[in-house]
Image (cartoon, grey):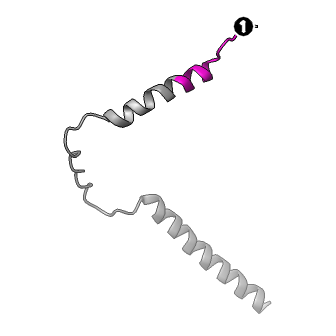
Amino acid sequence: MKFVPNKLFIFTIFTALFAPAMCIAGPPVDGPPPPIPPGPPGNPIDGGIYILLIMAIFYGIYSVNRYKIKKAA
């Protein structure tokens, strides 16, 4: 009976062999990463949020008016 390793088995073996070396050596140390530049000026809220808010307001007005019409009838 032959032992034929599949790709997952080979990947697992190589990962198990190289994981301790990567933990000990680690990535090269070049100091801390550079600071993140500030974002563009303007409103930090996305435009899609405004559209959803406007739609919710209009739906609220519509449902209140519909309820008033049903109540009056």
Per the image, label 1 sits on a secondary structure element best described as loop
- Residue, far right: 73
Residue 47 location, x and y as percent? 43, 59
Report the magenta residues as a range. 2-13
* Side of 46 where 34 appears, left or right: left
Q: Which is nearer the eye, 68 or 51?
A: 51
Q: In this view, does 5 lie above or below 19?
A: above
Q: Position of residue 54 (x, y in %)?
A: 51, 69
Drawn side of residue 63 relative to residue 58, left or right: right
Q: Which residue is drawn at 27% across and 55% down?
A: 39
Q: Which of 43 and 15 is in front in this view?
A: 15
In the image, residue 52 sits, relative to residue 23, either above or below, namely below
On the image, which quarter does residue 3 sit in?
Answer: top right
Magenta-span inclusion, residue 12: yes
Q: Quadrant of the C terminus?
A: bottom right
Q: Residue at x 57, y 19 (%)?
A: 10
Label 1 amino acid?
Answer: Lys
From the image, tell me which residue sits under label 1: 2
